[in-house]
Image (cartoon, rainbow, N blue to C red):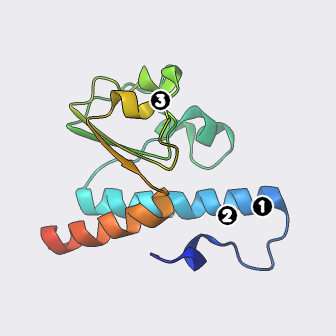
Amino acid sequence: MANNAAITPPAEITDEKQKEVWKAQQGFALIRELAGVLKAAVGASRAAVDAGYIPYANQVGQTGKVVSPDLYIACAISGAIQHQAGMRTSKNILAINKDPEAPIFGLARFGVVSDMHKFVPALTAELKKRLGR
């Protein structure tokens, strides 16, 4: 999934809302694969939960769960203060966001300015290689 075709919805999806849902579903598939390699859990912002992309049980933030893992990977998370309330005590935070001004970078120990749809597949492939998974 390292090329742009992977993030372009199929031609039969013409409605903009359906395109957005399709892209979010693809993003969560990438995140689930990465989480599987790392033997980790998947969390989400309230916006993703409210949009119906992922169940409420996965919500992290002021109105969701508070987590404090050794590594928190924030993929396409802007870093609103409400979300930070649920993950700011994480030991290490890796932020992946295409917006270099996203607030999450102020909290992250490591930051990657990139589209997660391009970066996460490369990260997952490298981790599979290195971890033998």
Tell whether label 1 touches label 3 (CB within 8 Å): no
Percent position (x, y) of residue 110? Answer: 27, 41
Q: CA–CA distance between discs 1 and 2?
A: 6 Å
Identify whether 63 is placed above or below 132: above
Is 37 or 8 nearer to us in this picture? 8
Is 9 or 60 nearer to us in this picture? 9
Q: CA–CA distance between discs 3 and 1?
A: 28 Å
Find disc 2 in the rendering and name its residue.
22
Amino acid at the residue labelled 2: Trp
Name the residue rendered at 44%, 42% in the picture. Answer: 43
Percent position (x, y) of residue 57? Answer: 50, 37
Tell me where residue 30 sits by quadrant: bottom left
Residue 109 can be seen, yes or no: yes
Residue 64 can be seen, yes or no: no
Give the mark nearer the N terminus: 2 vs 3. Answer: 2
Find disc 3 in the rendering and name its residue.
103
Is 12 or 42 nearer to us in this picture? 12
Comparing labels 3 and 1, the label whose residue is closer to the camera: 3
Find disc 1 in the rendering and name its residue.
18
SS label for mark 3: loop
Amino acid at the residue labelled 1: Gln
Q: In the displayed structure, does residue 58 sit left or right of residue 16? A: left
SS label for mark 2: helix
Give the mark nearer the N terminus: 3 vs 1. Answer: 1
Using the image, tell me which numbered label, if any, was put on residue 43.
none
Tell me where residue 37 sits by quadrant: bottom left
Name the residue rendered at 34%, 47% in the picture. Answer: 41
SS label for mark 1: helix
